Amino acid sequence: MATQPNRPSPGNGGGPPLVELRDIVKRFGSVIALNGVTMKVHAGEVMCLLGDNGAGKSTLIKTLSGVHQPTEGEILIDGKPVVMQSPRDALDRGIATVYQDLAMIPLMSITRNFFMGREPGRGKGAFGGFDVGEANRIAKGEMGKIGIDVRDPSQAVGTLSGGERQCVAIARAVYFGARVLILDEPTSALGVKQASVVLRYIAQARARGLGVIFITHNVHHAYPVGDAFTILNRGRTYGTFQKEAVSREEVLNMMAGGKELDELSAELEEFSRTDAAAAGAREHAIAEELHREAAALHKH
């Protein structure tokens, strides 16, 4: 198994991480969802949080984004311990989460979805209103920065592809000041072409100095853009590994649980041997029966 090298992560300049989790434990009654998870994310780094279904990825992200409070452990931002009581606390500290369902309304326009809850006003008080022209200009410009040409930002967001809708949500978070971008399975329901659009924008977000936490169970999507990999298995972490210190196959093996795979392989081999022995016995019995029948016919 690869070991974690002692060197700064890409883009951190030796400074404190944007966000750090130390020995996070999360219990729900008698159920331990997270058990001593540690992770750091620096500016200009894509940290891939990997694990199979039930590994604890969603619980960890909800803890980091203020939905849950950790039972034990601490969260640090810019090296200082913080307590986040709600998702609003996380947003105010520059941590934005783009969930799998995107929290978008398909029948509303791209612009309306882009500015939902943060509409730019025109005028003041009761005579103010939503400045549609300015909002359209900003939404179109921000989407253009990531290579998506929106001809008409007033079109329904439901007319966009899945990858483009993901990019609307990501661009919205970045525009409103996110420093750490948490992406919850952004490519899970996308085809190869649409997934590549999202992966390209993840790389662009890193180039702009953001820290990105990319949650996925797909190593083939994570490995091309990831700088480091934190691997969860049943609420525990195998550790964090820099890309140059671990191969794609090693990451996949740790995600699946190498010991479990070895045990399964041994079981399958045993099944094969048992099945082969049983099949041989059946074939021998059939051959004996045919031989007896042939002998009986020969006597008659």
Image (cartoon, rainbow, N blue to C red):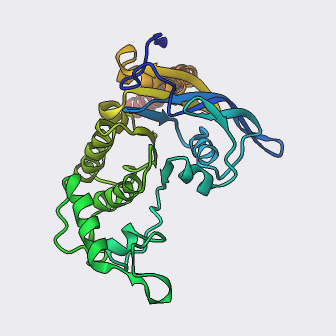
Residue 77: horizontal and vertical position, in percent? 57, 36
Which of the 4 image quarters holds residue 8? top left
Residue nearest the observer in this picture, 175 or 171: 175
Going 32% across and 56% down the picture, which residue do you hit?
Answer: 167
Q: Quadrant of the C terminus?
A: top left
Residue 56: horizontal and vertical position, in percent? 61, 40
- Residue 35 in view in this figure: no
Going 26% across and 78% down the picture, which residue do you hit?
Answer: 133
Going 31% across and 72% down the picture, which residue do you hit?
Answer: 135
Residue nearest the observer in this picture, 42 or 193: 42
From this viewpoint, which residue is outermost toward the front? 124
Decide if residue 182 is on the left or right side of residue 131.
Answer: right
- Classify 125 as above or below 169: below
From this viewpoint, which residue is outermost toward the right? 30
Going 46% across and 24% down the picture, which residue do you hit?
Answer: 253
Decide if residue 209 is on the left or right side of residue 233.
Answer: left
Residue 278: horizontal and vertical position, in percent? 53, 26
